[in-house]
């Protein structure tokens, strides 16, 4: 039997009234159809993170532990000013090793570009964190009004097709990288 993939869905926004809540709810609801995924939704707002980099802070330790427990990640990110958010960059910079040797996929949203400019920049950051980013992305251009409060998506067919392909490739990478993390040079940080 195949071992489950521990998948962390990470919020990329901390703004009040964020659309990210609705997008995360849609993704989490869709992933219920994958019995071999164990989902952990990680919202940076849950951790009372310090304003400055303090790796000894309880919130940082808790965030680090949750990220370390994951086999793979989906980052849900908006695009602000042709990039990703400062709050997401802060989270990425707070911890280092929990990302190593793991695959990362993206669900993005924004104006006409659908958040893809943010994802392109995130790929550079994740390369420095020793991850493998999945090429396939779920993107929502001009998403305002498409998501109900509970995350129900209007006309979800195309987004579902993109999500199915992205999850297939993300879980393939997760299964390939999981045993590799137990070897050098990542052995010392393997969960």
Image: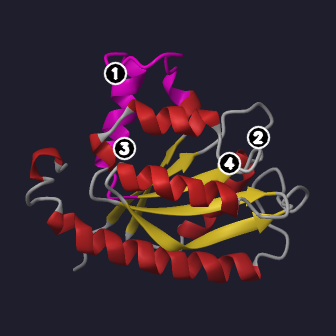
Residue topped by disc 4:
83
Choose the circle earlier in sequence order: 1 or 2.
Answer: 2
Q: Percent position (x, y) of residue 123?
A: 50, 58
Q: Earlier in the sequence, mark 4 or mark 3?
A: 3
Q: Position of residue 4 (x, y in %)?
A: 31, 67
Quick check: 113 above or below 186?
below
64 left or right of 183 in image: right
Q: Is residue 45 above or below residue 73?
A: above
On whether residue 136 falls in the magenta region, the answer is no
* Image position of 189 (left or right of 90): left
**Relative horizontal placement of residue 43, taking residue 146 as reference (left or right):** left
Query: Which residue is labeled 3 in the image?
Result: 67
Whichever of callouts 4 and 2 sits on the residue coming sooner in the sequence is 2
Q: CA distance from mark 4 to mark 1?
A: 26 Å
Q: Which numbered dot is residue 25?
A: none
Q: Position of residue 34 (x, y in %)?
A: 47, 73
- Residue 142 point in image, percent of width and height: 86, 61
Query: Which residue does the numbered mark 2 point to in the structure image?
Result: 18
The segment highlighted magenta reads 46-72
Q: Residues within 10 Å of mark 3 (few under 14, many from 20)?
A: many
Eye-nearest disc, 4 or 3: 4
Can you see residue 144? yes
Closer to the eye: label 4 or 2: 4
């Amino acid at each position: 039997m195949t071992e489950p993939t521990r998948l962390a869905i990470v919020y990329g926004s901390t703004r009040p009234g964020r659309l990210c809540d609705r997008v995360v709810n849609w993704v989490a609801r869709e992933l219920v159809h994958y019995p071999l995924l164990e989902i952990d939704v990680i919202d940076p707002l849950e951790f009372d993170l310090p304003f400055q980099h303090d790796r000894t802070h309880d919130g940082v330790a808790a965030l680090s532990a949750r990220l370390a427990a994951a086999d793979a990640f989906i980052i849900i990110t908006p695009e602000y000013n042709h990039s990703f958010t400062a709050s997401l960059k802060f989270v990425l910079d707070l911890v280092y090793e929990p990302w190593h040797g793991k695959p990362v996929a993206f669900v993005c949203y924004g104006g006409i570009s659908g958040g893809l400019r943010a994802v392109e920049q995130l790929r550079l950051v994740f390369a420095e964190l020793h991850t493998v980013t999945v090429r396939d992305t779920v993107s929502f251009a001009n998403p305002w009004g498409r998501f109900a409060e509970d995350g129900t998506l209007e006309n979800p067919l195309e987004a579902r097709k993109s999500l199915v392909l992205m999850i297939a490739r993300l879980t393939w990478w997760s299964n390939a990288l999981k045993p590799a993390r137990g070897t050098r040079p990542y052995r010392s940080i393997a969960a």
